[in-house]
């Protein structure tokens, strides 16, 4: 048993990111995540990229943002995110992005920082969150720039 675990570990090291991560545990306090997932503030410019990139946040597919008007395909599933940092604290935004169902039961918004208990996950993504901890922090930093 121990031997096969060691073998699996060695194999994971070889193929790198295709291996499952540890289950993510979110430190939820009062419907929010007060602690930065990385221990550091995010980068707004990187967050804008995550927001716009279809394979990452793809947030624009569902949300409108006035300052990104030049971009195509603003979706209307979700509310406009103009001034969103005035409606929610940073800690609340972190939980909304990581695991929105904890705030909006039955929402169609994906959980961007969970890696278990998810439905309809493509095999290559099993055990992985959509965004990394750093990408979540970057998106939060970007949301804070939206007036
Ligand atoms: C598939 C559509 C979809 C995607 C993709 C999506 N969202 Fe959402 N989002 C929603 C919906 C719908 C709501 C409204 C909550 C509800 O369902 O009642 C929402 C709510 C929110 C809210 C709360 C806004 C408010 O004013 O109450 C924030 C913040 C948010 N989303 C951020 C994001 C970010 C950041 C991303 C990308 C990382 C993202 N969303 C991607 C659909 C989406």
Image: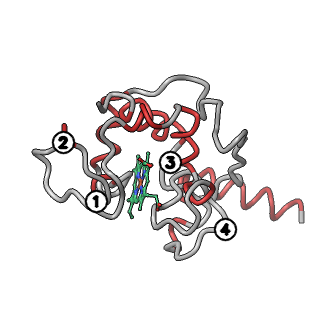
Spatial CA span between label 3 and label 4: 16 Å
Residue carrying label 2: 68
Few, some or many residues within 10 Å of mark 3 (<14, 14–19, 20+): many
For residue 7, what is the image quadrant? bottom right
Which SS class for mark 2? Answer: helix
Q: Give me the C-alpha separation between circle 3 and circle 1.
A: 15 Å
- Mark 2 is surrounded, within 10 Å at the Cα level, by few (under 14), some (14 to 19) or many (20 or more) other residues, namely few
- Distance between the Cα atoms at labels 4 and 1? 24 Å
Reading the image, the residue beneath label 1 is 61
Point 32% across, 59% down: residue: 62
Residue under pointer 3? 97
In the depicted view, which residue is nearer to us: 107 or 73? Answer: 107
Front label number (4 vs 2): 2
Going 85% across and 61% down the picture, which residue do you hit? 3
Q: Are marks 4 and 2 in contact (CB under 8 Å)?
A: no
Upstream in sequence: badge 4 or badge 2 = 2
């Amino acid at each position: 048993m121990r031997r096969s675990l060691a073998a699996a570990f060695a194999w994971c090291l070889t193929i790198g990111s295709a291996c499952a991560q540890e289950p993510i545990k979110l430190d939820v306090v009062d419907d929010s995540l007060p602690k930065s997932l990385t221990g550091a503030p995010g980068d707004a410019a990187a967050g804008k990229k995550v927001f716009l990139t279809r394979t990452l946040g793809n947030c624009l597919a569902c949300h409108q943002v006035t300052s990104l008007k030049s971009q195509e395909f603003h979706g209307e599933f979700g509310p406009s995110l103009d001034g969103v940092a005035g409606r929610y604290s940073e800690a609340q935004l972190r939980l909304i992005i990581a695991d929105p169902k904890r705030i909006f039961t039955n929402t169609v918004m994906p959980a961007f920082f969970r890696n278990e208990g998810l439905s309809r996950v493509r095999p290559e993504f099993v055990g992985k969150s959509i965004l990394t901890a750093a990408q979540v922090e970057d998106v939060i930093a970007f949301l804070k720039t939206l007036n």
